[in-house]
Amino acid sequence: MNKILPTAKLDAPNRFREADRPHSPLVAFGPDKPLQLDAGIELSPFQIAYQTYGVLNAARSNAILICHALTGDQHVANVHPVTGKPGWWETMVGPGRPIDTERYFVICPNVVGACMGTSGPSSTNPETGAPWGLDFPVITIRDMVRAQAMLLDHLGIEQLFSIAGGSMGGMQVLQWCASYPDRVFSALPLATSTRHSAQNIAFHEVGRQAVMADPGWRQGRYIVEGADPRRGLAVARMGAHITYLSDAALHRKFGRKFQDRNNPTFSFDADFEVENYLRHQGSTFVERFDANSYLYLTRAMDYFDLAADYGGIVANAFRGSRTRFCVISFTSDWLFPTSDSRAIVHALNASSARVSFAEIETDRGHDAFLLDEPELLTIVRGFLQSAGRARGLEPE
Amino acid sequence: MNKILPTAKLDAPNRFREADRPHSPLVAFGPDKPLQLDAGIELSPFQIAYQTYGVLNAARSNAILICHALTGDQHVANVHPVTGKPGWWETMVGPGRPIDTERYFVICPNVVGACMGTSGPSSTNPETGAPWGLDFPVITIRDMVRAQAMLLDHLGIEQLFSIAGGSMGGMQVLQWCASYPDRVFSALPLATSTRHSAQNIAFHEVGRQAVMADPGWRQGRYIVEGADPRRGLAVARMGAHITYLSDAALHRKFGRKFQDRNNPTFSFDADFEVENYLRHQGSTFVERFDANSYLYLTRAMDYFDLAADYGGIVANAFRGSRTRFCVISFTSDWLFPTSDSRAIVHALNASSARVSFAEIETDRGHDAFLLDEPELLTIVRGFLQSAGRARGLEPE
């Protein structure tokens, strides 16, 4: 765990500083190393903020890249500098955990377009000295992956032992395996898809409209103008949060229980516990996340369609791949349902790739990949140990 | 079809007039006939706007009550006075249709809390002379039904031959059968539930928050203050609309097709057809619907829990009922899934009621009950013909 993290929670004004001067190691790429974007332009200069855990071995063969999801960041297994809360994947990553930081060198970069130190819409545009806002170019999953490859070049890591991520993180995992097959020894795409469905695009569009409907959004210029589209962003988060859970999990947790009382109030207060829970999800989210980044990253997910770059056939993206895959889905995930993971597996089978697949029984919905799911942890541990033996990281 | 409907679409200012002076027949209940509300207060005076189709027979035995859903109204089978569009259930209701206006006398009242002429938050508060806004009392499904019973008393109809409705309309159907079992000869609860689930409450709460986050909402005083929370209401409608469809239907209709072009624009325009469709749904909705009514009616649905009034056991609500039920659900409806309808059927079986049940195979989601679904139309026609023979409306 690196030492530049603050010990206490940052106040709201300080969180904006994370975009330029994060509490994370940073690599700045100058004019000689522009990021080539799918939009057809070059982003330069730009920077990547990242966290690392564990030690890179002498053979440089034990690196694992973690790809974060839409609202995640690089703070996988350390206290978050803005919220003061534990890292988002401490059940999975750490000493003795399945992604064991005593064995592996773990790297997690903040993605391009996000707001925790890698260049994004809340970063300072070097040409104007003001935050980019909507002048920041629209980015794609492939752009994120291209930037991560430049980070690995900088760190002197030619091949990853493994790469893991769920949801938008899983999209990056799949894109890595397609774009740089020789750089990925093994891969764990979790609760993800080779393309975003019409329903998922629709949910994202509602979230974007909620942000843009907030007069505090100011056409994306809220930082410069001292405004804040926090209510719109909170509504977007509330709506999205429902899609991360399952009806069964909501029923188990909340049912129709009233908040702090036994009867309805006949008002528009948060009468039901589930309403109060959602309002809390919305209000805590806006303390740590940038509204424009929410627009950019949802857009990147919507654009993701791996087959489109390979003649409409996903299997072509993995043709000749020697990467070992472990694909995992969750029974109650209706955002990235098991059928999406099966489609990945079929494509990998069609391209003769080495793949194992598990559908894990749980009622916790899409969020299950982030949670303390014993079967998930066991499968990831076993897959990495097996891949580690094949890679010569562990005794046969 | 009554004759006071306008032939052309109303402009926006005129739509607010519908709340007090609708293009529909009206019954005004004076101080001698208050509406007793579940909130423990009396609403008085109040009014009900309704449409009728067909002719009441001499025995007054051929009346069918239609209960509309959240965003529906009384304009079942005539041109809508605000939008100029056809009635919302013309596939089901009309001459020669399954609910045949040449045989039956069809009544559809606007529900209490709505905005098309029955008292609601956009109606004039007689005490102040200004629109009620949030001073209008919070109402329940049972309050809607109690008001409808007063309308039937006024029309001199002791017993309904049948009652039909989907979604929130189906909740009213179930409440009618529980509150006034002797007044309902047969009943068609479609795509509905005896209680709103935690997930559905959650989706409603996001919609309410979207409305209330709009600064044009003005704490519900937007009519008086000349404001309009149209963007917030449009966002609420967009989010809700996704839940009325199915992933499969969205995929079939839109897939990942781009709007008017073959490639992404790398912008936040409506790139995908599904985005454009949703934006259209949002913007047309706000032309005809009142934002506060949206709050009140979603709240009424959230509060609905039929078992709560009957010792926690739904079957008790139907104990001794002689009503003939036909319960219908749709395979791809994830908002009111078949399991909800099965729970209704089990409760009816447990109370020895007469019930038939059909789950209709379709990919059109919750909205299927409104659409031209041949199997739905056939089943409703057959059920009413059979019930009509039992009621002596048709030759044996």
Image: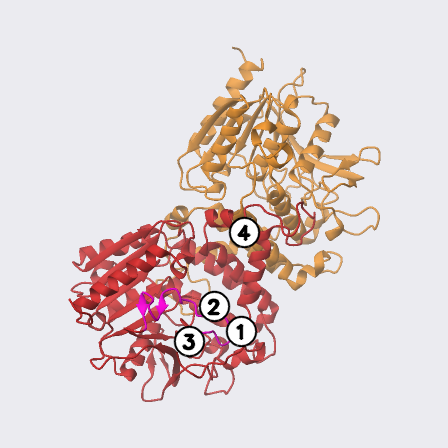
Chain colours: A red, B orange
Q: Nearer the viewer, residue A100 or B164?
A: A100
Asked if the magenta segment contains residue A96, the reply would be: yes
Q: Quadrant of residue A152?
A: bottom left
The earlier-in-sequence mark between 2 and 1 is: 1
Q: Which residue is mark 2?
A: A295
Residue B273 lies, in percent from the top left, at: 42, 56
Residue at 34 percent of width and 66 percent of height: A97
- Identify the mark at residue B322; answer none if there is no mark: none
Q: Going by the image, does B2 lie left or right of A311?
A: right
Q: Chain of mark 4?
A: B
Q: Secondary structure at mark 1?
A: helix
Q: Which residue is mark 3?
A: A137
Q: Chain of mark 2?
A: A
Residue A329 seen anywhere in this rendered image of the structure:
yes
- Mark 4 to mark 2 CA distance (whole Å): 21 Å
Q: Chain of mark 1?
A: A
- Is the residue at mark 4 from the same chain as the one at mark 2? no
Q: Amino acid at mark 2?
A: Leu
> Quick one: label 1, few (<14), some, or many (20+) residues within 10 Å?
many
Q: Nearer the viewer, mark 4 or mark 2?
A: 4
Q: Which residue is mark 4?
A: B203
Q: Amino acid at mark 4?
A: Phe
Above or below, A88 relative to B239: below
The range drawn in magenta is A78-101
**Contact (Cβ within 8 Å) of mark 4 with mark 1:** no
Q: Nearer the viewer, mark 4 or mark 1?
A: 4
**Contact (Cβ within 8 Å) of mark 2 with mark 1:** yes
Above or below, A126 relative to A257: below
Q: Which residue is mark 1?
A: A220
